[in-house]
Image (cartoon, rainbow, N blue to C red):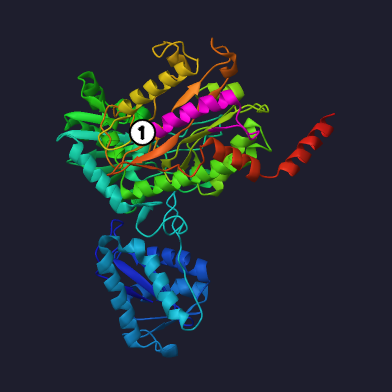
Amino acid sequence: MDFVSGLPRTVKGHDSIWVIVDRMTKSSHYLPMRKTYTVDKLAEIYIQEIVKLHGVPLSIVSDRDSRFSSTFWKKLQEGLGTRLKFSIAMHPQTYGQTKRTNQTLEDMLRACVLDFHRSWSRYLPLIEFSYNNSYQAVKRCTYCTIKVVDIGQPSPASHPQLLKGGELTPGTSSEEYVLRRKNFLELLPEKGLAIIAAAPVKMMTGVVPYTFRQDADYLYITGCQQAGGLAVLGHECGFCMFMPEANSHDVIWEGKTAGVDEALEIFKAERAYPKRKLREILPDMMKSSSTLFHNVRTSIPAYMDLEPFQKAAYHGKVKDVSDITHELRLIKSPAELKLMRESAAIGCQALLQTMLHSKTYPYEAILSAKVEYECKIRGAQRMAFNPVVGGGSNGSVVHYSRNDQKIKDGDLVLMDIGCELHGYVSDLTRTWPPCGSFSSPQEDLYELILQTNKESLKLCKPGASIQQIHNYSVAMLRKGLNEIGILKSEASHSYHQLNPTSIGHYLGMDVHDCSTVSYNRPLKPGVVITIEPGIYIPSSFDGPERYQGIGIRIEDEVLITDSGYEVLTASVPKEVKQIESLLNNFSYGMEVGMDRRNNTRVASK
């Protein structure tokens, strides 16, 4: 055992490495520590890191460091049954471990510390693994004492299947989060202060919470996927976090969560405090600010009840932070676009599998369950929203969500679905007849919606706006509905009853993303929108009976590029002949499905 000291002090105050070498395997174990640790503290670390992991050593050889030669240390080792052997200047030469090897080991550690600067303690387990694995590979014997630290959310160490080195959340690096905060501060007024609270945990019943989803603005700025935190950004304070403190009861029931140390080391906060100190520290930050920005959707009394906030609100100096964050979130970075492409691909594959399933299982509930299953087994964390599975006249309800009806033979089913992948969502809709063929009235309406979809896509380019595309689509639909006899004239007021929706919306971390950005804003490369023309004819509509109770929507996800657009959901068929061929030639388990339904009928008699 020995110490490598005189190292740069980390945020936790570590300035030395306790090096422990197994004399039999030659494997090393590195423990970050402070030079000022007492012998009692060293003994505590020794018990936790050596005795608990590897049992009691039979003998320890070290130089005559006063911490190892103290009476307390000797008594402790005697009590454990360990024999101490002290050398004068170096570790033992047993089994070929020479003084040169020891010096190389120390040089390697110091070189790594220079690379990682004040964050070296965070990477110490990785350094240990690399050294031990490379050393033992020659002997075909691997040995590692890495203890993966749980920070309350996936990390490269705990979830290497999800995150690469340097990523704070899957697909997004720590550097990108730092750049987002830099860009945020450039838009924040000189004496402005932004307060962004994490999403709260919402309860379904007294003790049962809903599945937690982080607020998009908080996640975008911090990378923290956990509840209870509060981020503060300002030109003077920089990036500050107030973190919840988990007690032993919380850890037992809900697991480890990130605290002050993680805020500094993992989330790269410049300052971090326990949340209980918010009322002591935040008021002074507020008092020196001319304008306060906060996340209205996640605002909490903990800061809103403070006198400086109340005073600022009274004088009209409190604004919604989304005025800034939505500007930043509108144009996606390459990393964000990669995640959005992957999310769209998962949604497309899931919906295609569900379409193939629908002929055998024409039930809204089954199709809803099927698409969710297909999304999640492909890596999605959750659905972006409750799937819309509207069979027959249910498809004429724009956001129908009951999903509890059997789809009648010959009816259409409208499915609007989306999934979320590492904070980024997809959104697409297809409408089809599970029976395998469109009726004549259904095809008439479907072709009108399909042509509107195609023509609207052609307008997607830099400089255009969602509102312009919407206006074009309305004119096209009015004309088409008038020609087939549903509207008495193109100017009929009944149109808004049949289509009360916009042609599309922005898409990103939220389904209706960047809601503060106007639909009149000219589109730019990197913006993602939806194009979703539809027609929703209630059964009670005063028009041709053959069209009553039909709902059709065709929705695609579109990325604006330098030269025009890219459809991210193009892999799901939308041509009539493609859909009919797909359903009639490639549907799954038709015979098995029929047998299963027949068995169900027999069992119910």
Dividing the image into 4 quarters, which one contains the C terminus?
top right
Q: Is residue 401 visible?
A: no
Q: Nearer the viewer, residue 372 or 213?
A: 372
- Which image quadrant for residue 17? bottom left
Residue farthest toward the left in the current orientation of the protein: 190
User: How many numbered badges does the structure rendering display?
Assistant: 1
The local secondary structure at tag 1 comes to: loop
In the depicted structure, whether residue 543 falls above or below residue 226: above
Residue 533 percent coordinates (x, y):
44, 27
Would you say 418 lies left or right of 190 here? right
Would you say 74 lies left or right of 185 here? right
**533 in magenta:** no
Dividing the image into 4 quarters, which one contains the N terminus?
bottom left
In the depicted structure, whether residue 54 falls above or below residue 150: below
Query: Can you identify the residue that label 1 sits on?
Result: 506
In the depicted structure, whether residue 20 falls above or below residue 410: below
* Mark 1 residue crowding within 10 angstroms, few (<14) / some (14–19) / many (20+): many
Q: In percent of the image, x 42 and y 10: which residue is there?
A: 493
In the rendered structure, which segment of residues is drawn in magenta?
Answer: 431-456
Would you say 162 lies left or right of 545 here? left
